[in-house]
Image: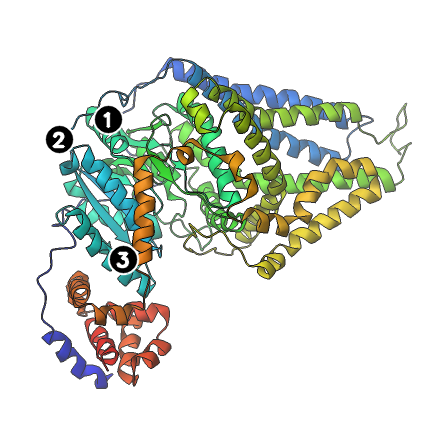
Amino acid sequence: MDGVAPLAARAAEVERPSFPPALPAEAPLAMPVQSLREAPAAERLPGRARLLARRIFVIGGAGLLTLFAAHEMFLVLNVGGLTLLEDVVLALFVVLFAWIGFSFTNALGGAVAMIGRREDPLGIGAEPPTALTQRTAILMPTYNEAPARIFAGLQATYESVEATGAIEAFDFFILSDTTDADTWIAEEAEFLALRARTGGQERIFYRRRPRNIDRKAGNIGEWVTRFGGAYENMLVLDADSVMTGDCVLRIAAAMERHPRVGLIQTLPVIVGGRTLFSRMQQFAGRLYGPLIAQGLAWWHGPDSNYWGHNAIIRTRAFAGCAGLPHLSGRKPFGGHILSHDFVEAALIRRGGWAVHMVPWLEGSYEEGPPSLTDLAVRDRRWCQGNLQHAAVLPSRGLHPVSRLHLLTGIGSYITAPLWLIMLIAGLLTALQARFVPPDYFPSEFSLFPSWPAQDPVRAAWVFVGTMSVLLLPKFIAHALMLPRGALRRGFGGGSRAFLGLIVETLIAGLAAPVTMVAQSAAVATILAGRDGGWQPQRRDDGSVPLWATVRHYMPHTLFGVLLGGAAIAISLPLFFWMLPVVLGLVLAAPLVLWTSRARHALAGLLRTPEEASPPPVLARALSLTREIGGRNGTDEAVERLQADPALLDAHRAMLPDYGERMPGDYAPERLVARAKAHDAPDLAAALALLTPREKSAALGDGEALERLLALAAR
């Protein structure tokens, strides 16, 4: 290491440029780690009898539906007594029907809310003021995302807020957890360009964390402890979020009017779909999503949930209540909490703050995964995080509805393996009846012989009833859309929307078994102790390679062939009964390839209002994305810094302590990067020697950076 000592003197000689600060003055705010074993003292929110009645309707109604369905299924199976396998099928049926029954009664609650007079307890529908007394920080966390996309969306949101005349009340922060060196420098370049385009030097800021401690929750938490004291509220976005100024202003004004409100969650509308799969999600979210969300808001009231983005949060409520502890044990169940949003909402509510959802407020947008494979990758991470909630459920002081939020998060993934087990158990039951000789006269005394059988007629009615409970909310949503002329025209008319509903339902039905197997595998690997890691999401390109897709979905195909073969061996009617599942699994790879294509023939049936008449903020974001993406690529970082002195000056100024190593900092990546950079004869050799992590460390270290720049200048 002595050989690199002369570089330290050279780095110290680098003139420190005069650069407008990338960050404002720090305003620390304490964010203590919360205890899950002790409930804090908190003022209770007043209860409302109307909410209790609604909860009885939704939860009690689901319970009554489940009891009725369980009784009917018992009669189906109990023709001559229940076998062990039939007991398993019945138990699993009850659990799974309760899940869809709960969704059904929630949708009925949503229909009541949409038909009746709209409730607005926060006064969000009132004319928003053009001046606010409280300051709000708009936070854009990012992790190895395409800079053109995130900065275009943020600029569109900035300009829309500016157009309201209330821009003075808002500051914008890009909070980078990016680990890829080239993307990091591209972010810095786009940050400078964004300031130049908007003139927002005084209210647009950029901060990159060298270490991604606790991932997104840690990213937000670090901002709170450094800058949160200067802002009454923080509005958290995602890398694909866009919001209108009107929407932002309305929820910020509501926070001013209601000091006991800790969080307001909007309903982000999925937009920007290019592939058939993403357009299906976009269509489903736009047509059915409001019904589901209205139902949730109808019976949640001030005990609602948080979805991690496109929500405004009172900063001191978050700091005082939502400091997440690390769970005991090893990964995947131990460590920091991955699905942090549900837990943060539960802790904020535990602290005596109201958490509201406003699903009818327009102007909140996001994007969805472009392919079924991308959805599975995202689901794997969410699955691990939601299963961690089992350790949070026993926490002291949580509101019962908050516990229900955590349970539904767990259930959204546990139901997949339960469905799979039920299918296998049902198949084994039929196999037993077909090939295992029945014991008509068991050893126990009985007046009548034991006839292993099921009631096929009643079974058909149970199937019809179950499918009705599952699918009826879609048709309710369609019916509620019809009287709203502008919305109906946005979908291309009632008939086109109905055809889109059928197409989406059929394709989603084929994809459901594939998702079932993927989620079941995710649950199994998590229970086996395998950590899923943290990978950036694809936002644009849904294309998937042919042979890699075929190999990836080969187990699904083989499993489908096995199920189909077993069903045919038992009886042809059973095969037809299981055909939707078998077909979805056998066609898994072609289905993924087909739905990942852009410019699909069926896309016209899946039109949404935002596609038919794009809101100005979305049109602006798309235009900026094309402009920025076409002008700037993600070039090699060192060469880009060497070629752009202004960017290099800004990069140096944004490094903590201008890249100087602080006493006690013995990060191995930094030290190894210095040594490798010193030993390399040229830049190409240095870049070949450095790992991605070491390259990022080198760009954050003044000494190593100077060596790389010297190599680039040769």
Q: Is residue 33 visible?
A: no
Camera-side residue of 601 and 287: 601
Camera-side residue of 43 and 76: 76
Camera-side residue of 541 and 668: 541
Q: Quadrant of residue 186?
A: bottom left
| Location of residue 624 in the rendering, given as x and y in whole percent from the top left corner | 30, 48
Q: Nearer the viewer, mark 1 or mark 3?
A: 3
Q: Label 2, on which residue?
A: 133
The amino acid on which the numbered mark 1 sits, given as a three-letter code, is: Ala
Query: The residue tagged with tag 3: helix, strand or loop?
Result: helix
Q: CA distance from mark 2 to mark 3?
A: 32 Å
Q: Quadrant of residue 658?
A: bottom left
Q: CA distance from mark 1 to mark 3?
A: 33 Å
Which is nearer the N-term, disc 1 or disc 3?
Answer: 3
| Location of residue 221 in the rendering, given as x and y in whole percent from the top left corner | 27, 47
Left or right: 595 in relation to 315: right
Q: Residue at x 77, y 37 (%)?
A: 576
The amino acid on which the numbered mark 3 sits, given as a three-letter code, is: Glu
> Around disc 1, counting alpha carbons within 10 Å, would you say few (fewer than 14), some (14 to 19), or many (20 or more)?
many
What count of labels does the image hold? 3
Q: Label 1, on which residue?
A: 254
The amino acid on which the numbered mark 2 sits, given as a three-letter code, is: Thr
Q: Which mark is residue 187?
A: 3
Query: The residue tagged with tag 1: helix, strand or loop?
Result: helix
Query: The residue tagged with tag 2: helix, strand or loop?
Result: loop
Q: Nearer the viewer, mark 2 or mark 3?
A: 3
Q: CA distance from mark 2 to mark 1?
A: 12 Å
Q: Dividing the image into 4 quarters, which one contains the N terminus?
A: bottom left
